[in-house]
Image (cartoon, rainbow, N blue to C red):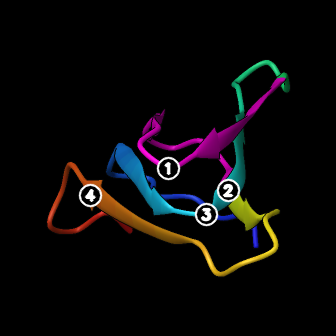
Amino acid sequence: PPHIHPRATEILVVIEGTLSVGFITTNNTLIATKLEKGDVFVFPKGLVHFQLNIGSVNAVAISGLSSQNPG
């Protein structure tokens, strides 16, 4: 589901599969794209964001956060 990390930026790397990802900017604009194997996306700190598997197989992704206490 859409969620937020008030104290951290998130980076996501797709290892397998296809994801629809995006976030809502501070002026309520949706920034969204489709990611495939090898693609990288950054979710800015404090913005509502999401990841959704839109492929026909399981998706695998690794994410990292810029804080040990992202919220």
Q: Earlier in the sequence, mark 3 or mark 1?
A: 3
Mark 1 surroundings: few (<14), some (14-19) or many (≥20) residues within 10 A: some
Q: Residues within 10 Å of mark 4 (few under 14, many from 20)?
A: few
The quadrant in which the C terminus is found is bottom left
Position of residue 63 relative to residue 7, above or below, is: below
Q: Quadrant of the N terminus?
A: bottom right
Quote the CA–CA distance across marks 4 and 1: 17 Å
Residue 36 in the figure: left or right of residue 31: left
Mark pair 2, 4: CA separation: 18 Å
At 60% from the left and 41% from the top, the residue drawn is 47
In the figure, residue 18 lies in which quadrant? bottom right
Q: Mark 1 or 2 closer to N-term?
A: 2
Q: Which residue is mark 3?
A: 17
Amino acid type, mark 4: Gly
- Kindly identify the amino acid type of the residue bearing the numbered disc 1: Lys
Which residue is label 1 attached to? 37
Residue drawn at (32%, 49%) of the image: 8
- Asked if one can make out residue 8 in the rendered structure from this viewpoint, the answer is yes
Magenta stretch: residue 41 in it? yes
Q: Can you identify the residue that label 4 sits on?
A: 64
Check disc 2 and give the amino acid type: Thr
C-alpha span from label 2 to label 3: 4 Å
Q: How many marks?
A: 4
